[in-house]
Image (cartoon, rainbow, N blue to C red):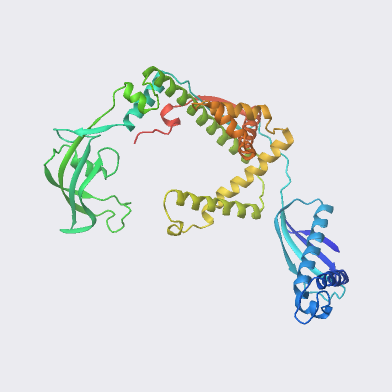
C-alpha cells in the first residue's frame, strides 16, 4: 500500500491511496477457501462446493469487504505516519488510472485545527455582584404571592390586575371578521393578553355594561389582513373579579412546602433559594463573557464535519423539545441553517476549551466534583440521597465533571483578564423586567 497527501485548504486534506491488486486477490482466495469449508449448497456435500461456484456467489461481496479493510489500513497508516488528527470521516473515491498493478483512490477529509492559545490580557470582563438582603427576599416572596393570587367577584369598575369575562364582536367595514368574536372570554387586565387599546376600553366597565369602540390594529399585527386596519368592537362585560393575594401566614408557608407552616422557616428557605439562584445566574453571566473572550482571542477555523454533526444534534434536541411540549415536529419543518451559527460557536468553544484544559491541566479533581455534588444537594430535604444517586451512576458524575471542568476554565480565564465588578440589578438579573 502507498499513500501521499496534499493540502488544499487550512483544514481539508487530500490523501492518495494505492492498494496492490495482487494483495487483494491473494487475500480473496484465502478467504473464499475458508468460506467454502462451511458453505452449504444443494447437490454438494459440506466442504466440497467447487471454488469457482463459491467465487461466483460470494466473490463480489468478499472483494468489497477486503478492499474496504485494505483502504482502512492504508488510510490509518498514512494519518499515523503523518501525525494527522482526522475530524469526521474521509470521503474515498476511485481514481481512474491506467495502473495495472494497483488500485488508486483519493481520500478527502478534514483535520482538527492546530493553534496556540491567544493572549487574554487585553480582554475585559464585567463581573455582576449582588448582595442578597431583605429587599430581595421581600420582592421574591411578593412574586410567590402573586403566583398564587385568587380572584374574587368585585362590585366596581374593572381595573388593571382584575380578571374579567367578556363577550366581544369585531367588525371591519360593518362586517364581522374571522377571529374577531368570542363568548365568555376570560383574561387578566394588564397581562398583555389583549391589545393595549382593547384593554383600555374594558377598564372602567362594570359587570353587565356594554360599549362600542374603534380600534386600529398595529402595522406589525400577525394577521396580515388586519395589520394596520381600523375596526369596531362591541363588548359586554359579564364578570369583574379583583385579585386577592394570599396572606403571609401558615397556609401560605405550607403552599411553599413548609410542612409545619412556620413563616420564619419559610422566609429562611426563600432566602436560601434566592442566594443559590443569584449565585447560579451570576456564574452564568460570567461564563458567557468568558466564552466570548476565548472566542475573540482565538479566531480558529473549525472542521465542517464537526459543525454538521453538531447541527444534527441540535436539530434532534429541538425535535425532542417539541415532542415534550406536546407538539408534532412535522408541523414545524426545521432547516439546518437555523442551527449553523450556534453549532459553529459550540464546536469552536469545544476545541478552544479543550486546548485550555490540556495546556493548563484544568481537569476536574475528585474533591472538586464531590464539593459540587454536595452543594447541589443542599436544596433537597435529604441531601445525602442525592449524593448517593450521583455516585451510583458513572455517567451522572461525568456530567458533573464537565461542569466542574468548565468552572476551572472560567476561573483560569478570569485570572488572565481584566475583571471589573458592577452591582447587578436584582430584577434584571432574575429576568423579571416589568413590561
Residue farthest to the bottom, as pictured: 43
Q: Quadrant of the C terminus?
A: top left
Which residue is the extreme one toward the front?
45
Residue 126 shows in this picture: no
Horizontal placement of 35 versus 238: left or right?
right
* Residue displayed at 15% across by 43% down: 238
- The residue depicted at 78 percent of the width and 79 percent of the height is 56
Give the camera-side residue of 2 and 265. 265
Q: How many marks?
A: 0
Residue 292: x %, y % from top left = 58, 38
Vertical relation: 163 (above or below) 375: below
How far across and how far down the image is residue 394, in percent?
64, 38
Q: Indicate whether 146 appears above or below 303.
A: above
Expressed as whole percent of the image width and height from the top left, the position of residue 331 reads 42, 58
Image position, residue 38 (x, y; %): 80, 70
**Relative side of 134 to 353, left or right:** left
Name the residue nearer the viewer: 433 or 123.
433
Identify the residue shown where x is 33% and y is 32%: 147
Q: In the figure, 233 relative to 269: above or below?
A: below
From the viewer's perspective, is 206 left or right of 19? Answer: left
Q: Is residue 419 above or below residue 220?
A: above
Query: Quadrant of residue 268 in the image?
Result: top left
Q: Which picture quadrant has residue 101? A: bottom right
Amino acid at each position: 500500500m502507498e499513500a501521499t497527501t496534499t493540502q488544499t485548504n487550512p483544514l481539508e486534506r487530500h490523501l492518495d491511496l494505492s492498494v496492490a491488486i495482487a494483495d487483494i486477490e491473494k487475500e480473496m482466495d484465502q478467504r473464499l477457501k475458508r468460506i467454502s469449508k462451511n458453505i452449504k449448497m444443494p447437490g454438494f456435500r459440506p466442504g466440497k462446493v467447487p471454488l469457482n461456484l463459491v467465487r461466483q456467489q460470494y466473490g463480489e461481496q468478499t472483494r468489497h469487504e477486503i478492499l474496504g479493510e485494505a483502504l482502512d489500513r492504508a488510510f490509518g497508516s498514512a494519518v499515523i505516519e503523518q501525525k494527522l488528527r482526522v475530524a469526521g470521516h474521509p470521503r474515498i473515491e476511485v481514481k481512474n488510472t491506467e495502473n495495472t498493478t494497483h488500485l488508486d483512490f483519493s481520500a478527502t477529509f478534514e483535520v482538527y485545527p492546530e493553534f496556540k492559545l491567544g493572549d487574554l490580557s487585553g480582554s475585559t470582563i464585567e463581573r455582576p455582584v449582588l448582595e442578597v438582603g431583605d429587599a430581595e427576599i421581600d420582592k421574591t416572596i411578593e412574586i410567590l404571592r402573586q403566583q398564587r393570587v385568587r380572584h374574587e367577584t368585585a362590585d366596581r369598575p374593572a381595573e388593571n390586575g382584575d380578571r374579567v369575562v367578556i363577550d366581544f364582536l369585531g367588525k371591519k367595514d360593518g362586517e364581522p371578521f374571522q377571529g374577531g368574536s368570542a363568548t365568555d372570554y376570560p383574561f387578566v387586565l394588564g397581562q398583555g393578553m389583549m391589545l393595549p387599546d382593547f384593554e383600555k376600553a374594558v377598564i372602567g366597565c362594570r359587570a353587565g355594561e356594554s360599549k362600542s369602540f374603534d380600534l386600529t390594529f398595529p402595522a406589525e399585527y400577525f394577521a396580515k389582513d388586519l395589520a394596520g386596519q381600523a375596526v369596531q368592537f362591541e363588548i359586554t362585560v359579564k364578570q369583574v373579579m379583583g385579585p386577592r393575594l394570599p396572606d403571609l401566614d401558615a397556609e401560605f408557608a405550607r403552599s411553599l412546602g413548609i410542612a409545619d407552616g412556620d413563616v420564619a422557616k419559610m422566609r429562611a428557605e426563600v432566602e436560601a433559594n434566592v442566594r443559590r439562584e443569584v449565585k447560579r445566574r451570576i456564574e452564568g453571566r460570567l461564563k458567557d463573557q468568558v466564552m466570548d473572550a476565548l472566542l475573540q482571542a482565538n479566531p480558529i477555523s473549525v472542521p465542517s464535519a464537526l459543525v454538521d454533526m453538531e447541527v444534527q444534534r441540535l436539530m434532534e434536541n429541538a425535535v425532542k423539545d417539541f415532542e415534550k411540549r406536546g407538539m408534532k415536529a412535522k408541523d414545524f419543518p426545521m432547516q439546518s441553517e437555523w442551527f449553523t451559527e450556534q453549532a459553529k460557536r459550540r464546536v469552536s468553544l469545544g476545541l478552544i476549551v479543550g486546548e485550555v484544559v490540556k495546556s493548563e491541566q484544568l481537569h476536574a479533581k475528585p474533591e472538586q466534583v464531590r464539593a459540587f455534588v454536595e452543594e447541589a444537594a443542599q436544596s433537597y430535604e435529604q441531601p445525602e440521597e442525592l449524593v448517593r444517586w450521583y455516585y451510583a451512576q458513572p455517567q451522572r458524575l461525568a456530567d458533573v465533571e464537565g461542569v466542574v471542568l468548565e468552572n476551572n476554565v472560567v476561573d483560569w480565564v478570569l485570572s488572565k483578564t481584566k475583571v471589573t465588578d458592577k452591582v447587578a440589578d436584582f430584577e434584571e438579573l432574575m429576568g423579571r423586567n416589568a413590561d
